[in-house]
Image (spheres, rainbow, N blue to C red):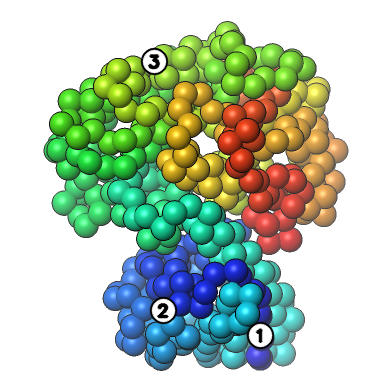
Amino acid sequence: MKFRFASGVAQEADSVFAWHAQASAFPRLMPPWEGARLVARSGTLEIGSTVDLAVPVGPSTRAWRARITAVDPGRCFVDEQVVGPFRSWRHTHSFLSVAEGCQIVDEIDCQPPVPALTSGWVGRRIARAFAFRHRRTADDLARHAAWPPRRLRIAISGAGGFLGGELADFLSAGGHEVVRLVRAGGQRPGCLAWDPSAGLADPSALSGFDAVVHLAGRTVGERWSSRVRREIRDSRIGPTRRLCEQLAALPAPPKALVCASAIGIYGDRGESVLDEDASPGAGFLAEVCSDWERACDPARAAGIRVVHARLGVVLGAAGGALAKLVPPVRAGVAGRIGSGRQWLSWIAIDDAVAALHHLVQSPLSGVVNVVAPEPVTNAGLMAALGAVLCRPTVLPLPAIAVRVAFGAMGQETLLASARVVPARLSAAGFTWRHGDLVEALRHQLGR
């Protein structure tokens, strides 16, 4: 079986090849709906280097090792399967200089395990995967090209999480120096030891950095027992204040701190349209987020540019809310939650990553809503997801069932209404590439 996929980007071929040569570009190109996991890689883009994946095959996983067998710097490289789910696999990546910039051409020559039975199915999966790869490549390259070609030094907490991991790979592939703040293994290349309860092991290592992006915090997506409430607060407020105090004490503190917050700060506000000037609401999440933002005061007082990124519901197939919604919708046992009229302010994960990059690069400070321009009702979200997956969404989850099963967490995260708009991002010229909900879902789910 042979396949050819081609698309154009505005950047020069050498730049596009260099982007692919970055180790973090490979995770950016992995289709999120496939569930493949990067296990290991050796070397950079050079003959003999390998990539090891764990690829889902039915209920189990299969090892897939690919080896680089040819490289023509700036023009092309070839990888071939060593072991894996195919009888054979050869993938030629070409980067052709054209008047408009670069034409990316992917040519696949492969043999599926049972050609007579699986060729059509395999072909469709490959086509979906490469449509995603080409779209994300073009988007990422355009995002980076929009800013001056400066190599920034950026530290990220929460880089092992759903959003933080995507951000770290995006920035690294774009040529920036990324340091991950980690609880263990701080001696690993590109990592710095950070204990949320004690702070940075060596704060001076961040002296002179361009930015710190602070995303760490315990998930709120489970029933809030007294212990869980305490852990949600303690994972955000104390660690943030300690981090800010350490940064503020440096002789050359980072220029910017982009600290996560959440639209939960607005509480349950019905039909009200909420921009950054809206006051905080009531409830546990609103209190936590307000205290979380105040915990950044030491950094602000030291002259560090502080941005509070009030994140909406980040939609991506690899984690978060969407990963939880897809299985019941696919099974045909999902529908609106409660009345379905409550507003949900969402953002596609690629746009969330790009927005955080924008906040690092731009002079913005203070509160910024990181959401898509068009909020959606809960019923609208479920209908859109059902349409994308070609499944009915007609089995509602009554509000009383949400309250019984999830308590206050269900009331504040599933039934509350927050119609939040990104006034400051819009005014700053930020561009959403996945601002349409159905298109965003199709991109993430390969539909």
Q: Is residue 88 left or right of residue 150?
A: right
Left or right of residue 183: residue 125: right
In the figure, residue 348 lies in which quadrant?
A: top right
Q: Which residue corresponds to mark 1? A: 4
User: What residue do we see at 59% from left, 46% from top?
Assistant: 351
Q: Is residue 344 visible?
A: yes
Does the rendering let one see residue 260? Answer: no
Name the residue nearer the viewer: 224 or 286. Answer: 286
Q: Amino acid at mark 1?
A: Arg
Which element type, helix, strand or loop, lies under badge 3?
A: helix
Neighbour tally class for label 3: few under 14, some 14-19, many 20 plus, Cα within 10 Å:
some
Q: Position of residue 47 (x, y in %)?
A: 34, 87
The Cα atoms of the two marked residues, 2 and 1, are separated by 22 Å
- Residue bearing the label numbered 2: 65
Mark 2 or mark 1, whichever is nearer to me: 1
Q: Amino acid at mark 2?
A: Arg
Report the residue marked by disc 3.
Answer: 294
Side of 188 where 84 appears, left or right? right
Give the mark nearer the N terminus: 3 vs 1: 1
Labels 3 & 1 near each other (Cβ < 8 A): no
Residue drawn at x 72%, y 55% as measured from the top left: 442
